[in-house]
Every structure is written in C-alpha cells, then in structure tokens.
Amino acid sequence: MSNSLTCDVVVVGAGMVGAATALYAARAGLSAVLVDRGPVAGGTTGSGEGNLLVSDKEPGPELELALLSGRLWADLAAEPGVGESVEYEAKGGLVVASAPAGLAALEELAAAQRSAGVRAESVGPDQLHDLEPYLAHGLAGGVLYPQDAQVMPTLAAARLVRLARTAGASLRTGRTVTDVLRTASGAVRGVRTSHGDIYAPAVVNAAGTWGGELAALAGVSLPVLPRRGFVLVTEPLPRRVRHKVYAADYVADVASDSAALQTSPVVEGTAAGPVLIGASRERVGFDRSFSLPVTRELAAGATRLFPFLAEVRAMRAYLGFRPYMPDHLPAVGPDARVPGLFHACGHEGAGIGLATGTGHLIAQVLAGGTPDLDLAPFRPDRFPDADADADAGGAGGAPASDPASASASEGFCP
Amino acid sequence: MTPRTPLRLVRARPEPPFTVTFDERELAVLPGQTIAAALWSAGVLSWRTTRGSGEPRGVFCGIGVCFDCLLTVNGRPNQRACLVRAEPGDVIRTQEGTGRHE
Amino acid sequence: MSERPRLAVIGAGPAGLVASLAAAARGVAVTLVDAAPQAGGQFYRQPAAGLGARRPSALHHQWRTWERLRDGLAAQVGAGRITHLTEHHVWCVERESASFAVHALLGPEEEESVVVRADAVLLATGGYEKVLPFPGWTLPGVVTAGGAQAMLKSGLVLPGRTAVVAGTGPLLMPVAVGLAAAGAKVAALVESADPKDYVRHARVLAAHPDKLAEGAWYAAELVRRRVKVHVRHTVVAAHGTDRLEAVTVGALDTDGRVREGSEWRVPCDSLAVGHGMLPHTDLAETLGCRLDGVNVAVDDEQRTDVPGVWAAGESTGIGGAALSLAEGRIAGLSIAARLDSRAPEPRSYVSAAKSRAGLREFFAAVDTVCTPTDRWVERVGDDTLVCRCEEVPAAAIREAVDELGASDVRTVKLLTRAGMGWCQGRMCGPAVAGLAGCPPTPARRPFARPVPLGVLAREPGEGL
C-alpha cells in the first residue's frame, strides 16, 4: 500500500462546518479533500434554520466565536454572487419579553453583551410594532440585535463547497469513513473510507452530531450527543415577519442541560416566503419519530407572538439533531491526544453561524499560524473520560433523561 | 340532433341555479357544484397567478392534491376550487401570488 | 355499545367501504372517515346530489358493485354499526398508548379539527396521479387524466370542447371514452406504451378474461366514437399563451426517443394527461409503518408492521378497484378477528386472496408495459418548470446535482425548493427523482395536509 500523501488535510463531514473548513483551508493554500457518507448538507445542516446569531449568547468564548463568524459571514456574503446565492439576510434579531421581570433579565444580558462588543438596542413596548407590525400586543419590550443574520443553510453549505472546489479542494460524497489511519507512533496519517484510503497528515472531524463516532475511530472520546429539534414551516407569505423574533426564555432553553422537552417560540420569515417556527429541544437519542405534542407547543408559542399566524397553515414539519456538548461549547482545534487530529464539531444549534469562524481558526492552525482566538476554551480533550461519566458517553449512547437535572437550569436568567 | 353534454349523459334534472360572483362577474352555478366546476361551466380555466412569474393556473389534479387551483373565496385566500362547494352569493376572486396583501 | 372494539377506516373508496362492511357485520364499531361529501372514493365518485342525475351509471363501470357497497353502507349506518364522517380531511394519525387518534379537519373550511379515537386503523387512502413534466404542462387546460374524470363525475363539467388524452396506463381509455360520451371531441388518445409488449405477459393476461373484455369494450367504444388512438406516441409539448391551444404529438422509436420528423400539431383546448398512479402513504409513514418502495408494506392479512394498523387498496400498491375490493375485504375480516383476539379463518377470505394474487400479478404486468422509459428526461428543456408550486425549472435541478453535490431527492429539494410548495412534492416528486437520476423515495410528510397553526395549537375536540 502506498503511503504517499493524497492531500494536506481530510475534512470529514460535508455539512456547514466542513464546507467552511474546506473553504478556508483551500484558500490558505492547503490541498483539502472533503468527504461525507451522504450528500452535501445531509445531516443537521439540512435540518436547520440558518441562524447567524450573537443575541442568544452570553459573554464568553462562544460569543467571541460568534462575533468573528459574523464578520466572516458578512465578508463572504459581499463576494460576487455569494450573498444572494446563500440567501444571506442581515435582518437582525428581535428578542421580546412578555413581562417586566423577563425584560429586566433581558436588559441585563444585553448590557453584558454590549460590553463584549455586541450591538444591542433596547426597544420599548411602543416601538415594537415599528419593527414588527404583526407582533402581539401587550409585550413588555425587547432588544434589537442588528448583527443577527440568516442564511439558507443547505444552500450555504453547497455554495461554500463550490467555492472551496474553485479554490482547489475536492469533494467526495457517498463515502463512509470507516477508520482513522494512524502511524505507529499514533499520529494521524489519513482515513479509510468505503471507497478506499485517503492519506493526509491532518484529519478534521466536522461530523457534527456524529462527531463522537469519528473521534472513537481515532481512539479518543468526544461527548457529542443528539438534541432533537422540530421546525414548523408555513405556507408562503408576503414578508410579515421581518426579523428573527423570539421570546427571551429561548436563551435559557439553549443554555439548559435538561434532557426533557423545552420549547420557546422562535419565528422568522425567509427569503422564499414561508415562515419558520422553532424551537424545541429534547434529548431522545436519534429518535426520528414525529411528535404531534411538540409541534402543538411550537404552534401555540408562535401564535402567541404573532396572532395572525393562527389562520396561516403549517405545510410541513421536520426534525434534526443538534450536536450537543455537555458545556454547550463546541470542540474546535487540535486534539492533544492524537497528533494530526482536529475537531470542528459540537456546535449544538449554532453550527451554521459559527461555521465560518470555526473553519477560519482551524485553517489558521493547519497552516501553521496563530489563531485569531484563543482555542483553549474549545479544547476537545477538556472533558473527563467517557468511562468516568455516563452522561458524556460516546455518540449514539442512550440519552440521559434525568428529571432532576431540569431544575438545574431554572435559576438561569438571560 | 341535440349536442351531447355531461348533464344529458346522466339525464340530470338539476335544482335551480343560483349566482355567485367571480371577479365582479355574475356566474350561474348548479347546486352541489364545486367552485372549479362552476368556473369550467362558465368557460373559465384559470383563476390564480403564481407568486414567482405570475403564470395563470387553474385545475390540474382535480382531487385536492396539487393545490394549483387556489383562489380567494369570501375573503379567505388559498381555497382549493376543486374541493370547495359553491354557495349562493359567494364572492370569488382570482388569487395573485400568496393571496395575501403585501 | 361502547364496549365494541372500535375501528377507524380512513377513506371511503372501494377498499375502505368493503372493509367497513366486513368489520361492521362482525361486531366492530366502525367510524368511516372520508374527505368527500359522498362515499365512493375516486373510482365511484358521485355527482353532487343537487345535480339530480337520474342515470349516474352512464359515467361508471361496474355499477352493480357500487350499488351493493352504497346500499350496504346505508344499511349499516342505519343500524348504527358504521358512523360515516364526510368532509373530514385526515391530517395525522397519532399512536397513543393503547389506541390511535385520528385527527381530521372539517371541510370545506378546514378551520376546525376533531379527533376520532380507535383501537385499530385501516389506511385506505387511495392514490393520485403521476404526471411527468413536458414543455407547456403548466398551461391552463392541461389537467391530469384522473382530474378530468373526477371533475366530470362529480361536477358534470368538461374542461373544453376538444380534448387530447395522453400519457400511459390503463386510465387513459376510460377517460377518453368518458369525455367523448359527455360530448367532448377527443382529437387523439396518445399512449406511449406499445400494446405489443403485452405479448410477453400473455399467460398473465389470459388468466384475466374479464380485464381483457373490459379493454376490448373500451377499444370498441373508442372506434365507435371515432377517437384516433396513437400508440408508441407522446405529447412532446403543449402550446398556448394564457391557455392551451394545441399540443405537438410525436412518434417514439424503440429507444423511447421521439422520431425525427414524426411530429405534428393537434389543435385542442384541453389535454388530459397521466403517467400512472402513486399511493398516498403519508399517514402510514408518520405512524412508522414500513414502506416497500413507494407502497405501504402489508402481510397476507393486510396488516402493516405497526400493530393495530392495516392498509388496503391503492396505498399498498396501485391495482385498481377490483384489487382494492379484495384487499379491503381481507383487511375487514382480519381486523374483526384480531380485535377479538382471534386469527381470521383463512377459509373466510380464500376467494378474496385468490383474486388479490391474480390482480397483483396482472397489474405488475401492466406496470412493466406502461412505465415510461427514462428518455422523457431528455425532452424536458432547462426552462421547463418541474415543481409547479415553487416554479423550479429543470435547470435548477440539474445544477443541484451537477454543481452543488446533491445526490438524493431530499438534498435537491433543499437546494432548489422543488417539492417545498403547497403540494409538498406530490406532483414533482417522480420528475425530480428522474432528472436527478436517483430513486424516488417517499418524502416524509408529518402533516398529510396543511393545518392552520391556530388549529394545531389547540387541543382537538372529540369527533365522536
């Protein structure tokens, strides 16, 4: 068997994060091969809403990554033809609170975010309808986040892959990675796929919700767990929902560690016309069965925020599995346990938004440079070993469903 | 020889017709007919324009599956003409795009 | 009487009707849930009562069978054994701990939903027509063959004066004869299949003299009504600006390509076109029933692999009314026995099972002869719309596959919006798969029809 190198880096997973990683790696002059067992965007990317958000993040490393990513998204969108082809819309997010207590908590979060570089504009109850004419009456107020944006995620992944190929990367879909090849000393030397070996001194794990399985092939544990979400899609409408609009309790749900079902209304229009309605979160493994009660809650939440939606029809619902990490931070960067192995996964519901920053940082490290952000908080080996913690078991493990853990999140206020 | 028609074929003795309006024009409808059947009887084959390129559309599948025959009935948009029975006095309108005001 | 086991039958076509009658006669409390104002399904679709049709049989075949079903239903409804819910549009069937919840929107407004609870469910949801795209197929005046027939049967109307009937499959002849009988001039019947191909299935055909006689009757009617039949021909394009004015017909060579110089124009104001049928499987899919290709998979008793859920008729594979009747009878007998914790007596349905086996074999043969070759893809120009709802042209499908890394129907949909519109890909599904060069996989549609969010948000009231 020849050991000659096929390329500089193999990126496993042709979702949003893999696409961005391949793009920035190729633009950094590296030869990259992007491989996926399915088509482009066949996993969580194809089930997402395409959020590029800073509004739902507390100050800290994830917010820094989101701010970097937002700038990179804007740069990409400004390239000829790109913004339109990925349906990039810098429409801003509007977070609303129904009661004064919730508004106070929201304002507190916004103040902290402002000091971290986020633009956050307080919106009084009288001004809400200038921004969103169809919003329910009687809300306490809200905060507008002009930096929040949206893309159509499948288009974004496919278009970024296209740009990566233009920059010299190659795409190999329909091949399953069956092993991570390693040298006698344990360093990565490529991957084995269902269609032959690909040799490279670096492998990037961009396998999203299935990232734990890929890590296991390289002999390390990475606690990525699926967190199921449903999205409702309405009939096509004229633009009646202008921003991404959500209730303040969404932030608490995102940050929650509970396995039990949580829903909080998230409503946004799309360039194509339909309104998308989220967001539910539950840890039920990779259960693909439809749940009428969950979609009922989503519909109830959305019609409370936008009463006109009551007579608008839901045309379909779909589900996806967010790659959930126990501390809600993705794994980004080299894995100290296996030389040559990099991780770029575990972004939970923020992978579309954080993809550009993630790909950019990985490419910087691959090219031997210093990353723009400190990667220490995203260290892939920051978790205790899988054997020591049942809840952080390898991918595909049984979901933890501990009712007691639900209360742990209740004290959190955005 | 009298021309063949569907009504003659089944020896129909319909109840007296009533009227509805379609884009301000009065149409006679036989009781029980769907809005699509009433429009076909009046020689109208299209009553919707698409939201992309404004193409005219009417009945395609005829059984409620394709949603090509959408129109606005008594102010309610996106009604399937092939399923909804016409009622006396119905105000029926051609539907443009999403059927909702921009 | 509430201790009687409860069965919800979804669909009042031949399969659902005969199953309801068989189960009700054996002590099951049946709720027959159907979207139409009258029972009959598509095959026995009836003229609206107000139209006063005194001879509706003129539009139908096998009228005696219908009379038996109709009268049987009336008797069982009168006896309180069957509840017939008309204009109930089922949008979801939910599995509960020990029963099923059938959610239905009340028509025609569809602004209110009710729930019917049952111990067992029979999915007799029927099918709809498949149409492959060609230039001009979105023009008003172009309708599905089954659609033209449905509008005629229930509304006693025609789409125009001069019709062309085209496509492939056993539905075309009855549609052409029906339109002609009702007064349309049928300028041509254009069938892409070659009847000579049936020779290879001579043994199967010979076992069905009734079917052959039916075919011969329609052929004679076409001759009598001077309908010109063109086999191994296809409609290449439909023409017109705001409505259909003519079609171009061309001859197909043995490869399925249009023979050069063979094309001519046929003036017409309506085109009834169809390329076969597809089953409605959304409710089954959401319940978690296994599908076999595009059909609901069932065992000898018409049971799906989800306990308590049966399926019969077109949803388990396209095969027409007679096969639906056989499957419906078997399902009804099985349900009555199983709800009583017994196995059905095989003797009770031996003739239905024999009929089912023969008809499945017959329609498998028809299917081989009447499946369009892949050459239709070559006739779809880049600017021809494939998805009618979202107005997606063939060029976009081709770009998704050739340029953007799509290798399956779902990714093509996400990249192009083909299949994301009102019909949720029911119309364009086969065409998208054909253009993308991948197998047609049934889409997941948790909502079998659109549901107002306000209705979805509310807990439903009991329908019964």
Image (tube, rainbow, N blue to C red):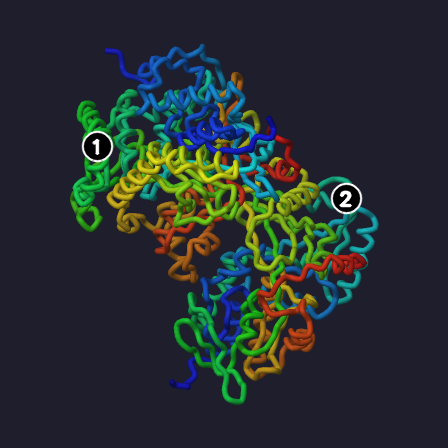
Q: Residue at x 31, y 19 (%)?
A: C58
The kind of residue tagged 1 is Pro
Q: Is residue C10 above or below residue A334?
A: above
Q: In the image, which disc is placed on residue C209?
A: 1
On the image, the x and y values in percent for residue A379 come to 65, 76
Measure how far apart labels 2 and 1 are at the Cα level: 73 Å
The answer to whether one can see residue A133 in this image is: no
Q: Is residue A400 above or below residue C29?
A: below
Location of mark 2 (residue): A139
The answer to whether one can see residue B37 in this image is: yes
Q: Quadrant of the image for the N terminus of chain C?
A: top right
Q: Is residue B7 above or below residue A394?
A: above
User: Outermost residue toward the bottom?
Assistant: A185
Task: Identify the chain of the residue marked 2, using the numbered disc in the image.
Answer: A
Q: Quadrant of the image for the C terminus of chain C?
A: top right
Q: What SS does tag 2 mark?
A: loop
On the image, the x and y values in percent for residue C34 come to 49, 30
Task: Identify the chain of the residue marked 1, using the numbered disc in the image.
Answer: C
Residue C414 or residue C29, whichever sits in front = C29
Q: What SS does tag 1 mark?
A: helix
Task: Tell me the crowding category of disc 1: few under 14, some 14 to 19, or many 20 or more residues within 10 angstroms, Cα based.
Answer: few
Q: In the image, which disc is placed on residue B34?
A: none
Q: Quadrant of residue A399?
A: bottom right
What count of labels does the image hold?
A: 2
| For discs 2 and 1, the disc positioned in front in the rendered view | 1
- Marks 2 and 1: same chain? no
Q: Is residue C362 above or below residue B87?
A: below
Residue A122 or residue C249, whichever sits in front = C249
Marks 2 and 1 in Cβ contact (< 8 Å):
no
The kind of residue tagged 2 is Leu
